[in-house]
Image: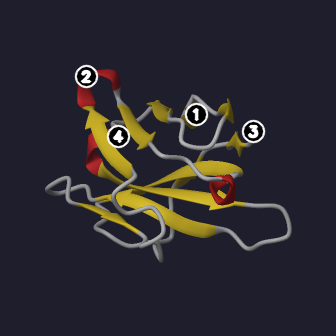
Amino acid sequence: QVQLVESGGGLVQPGGSLRLSCSASGFTLSHYGIGWFRQAPGKEREGVSCISSSDDATYHIPSVRGRFTVSRDNAKNTVYLQMNSLKPEDTAVYYCAAVLGGMLGFKWEYDYWGQGTQVTVSS
């Protein structure tokens, strides 16, 4: 079965950290560019971080730059979003999406989407 599954969300205090995982089954994630998106209640979905398929270059939007990092573990067919120094405004459902041969950016026609994982930053 071809699918993308996120995990690792939860409740964390401001200043804390979480690592989200985006695991693929049925296809090889290293061939895909990966975008991490989030959607907070009442807001539109926004692209947060991404990693290209070709050279693993990464991009982060200014509000998370220096706090979030994206990495791959090809042996585990998984991409990670490490989130540090979390703020209440980071609270959202986080999604990963995969596009074959994708480079940096969030405007792709993604081939696969995960189901989302909730991240709540609150004291």
* Image quadrant occupied by the C terminus: top right
Q: Say left or right for 51 vs 68.
A: left
**Viewed as shown, does residue 88 lie left or right of 5?**
right
Q: Nearer the viewer, residue 123 or 100?
A: 123
Q: How far apart are the two marked residues, 2 and 3, measured between alpha carbons?
A: 36 Å
Residue most extreme to the top: 76
Residue at 54 percent of width and 35 percent of height: 2
Give the secondary structure at mark 2: helix
Judged from the image, the secondary structure of the residue bearing numbered disc 3 is loop
How dense is the environment of label 1, judged by Cα within 10 Å: few (below 14), some, or many (20 and up)?
some
Q: Earlier in the sequence, mark 1 or mark 3?
A: 1
Between 22 and 109, the one nearer to me in the picture: 22
Quadrant of the drawing holding the N terminus: top right
Mark 2 neighbour density, 10 Å: few (under 14) some (14–19) many (20 or more): few
Q: Mark 4–mark 3 contact, CB under 8 Å?
A: no
Image location (x, y in percent) of residue 5: 58, 34
Tell me which residue sits at (58%, 35%) in the image: 6
- Using a 10 Å C-alpha cutoff, classify the residue at mark 3 as few (fewer than 14 neighbours), some (14 to 19) or many (20 or more): few
Q: Is residue 9 shown above or below 60?
A: above
Q: Tell me the kind of residue under disc 3.
A: Ser
Q: Is residue 83 left or right of residue 6?
A: left
Location of residue 110 in the rendering, given as x and y in whole percent from the top left corner: 51, 62
Query: Which residue is label 1 attached to?
Result: 5
Tell whether label 1 touches label 2 (CB within 8 Å). Answer: no
Disc 2 target residue: 75
**Mark carried by residue 123:** 3
Q: Which mark is residue 29?
A: 4
Q: Marks 1 and 3, Cα distance to the nearest angstrom?
A: 28 Å
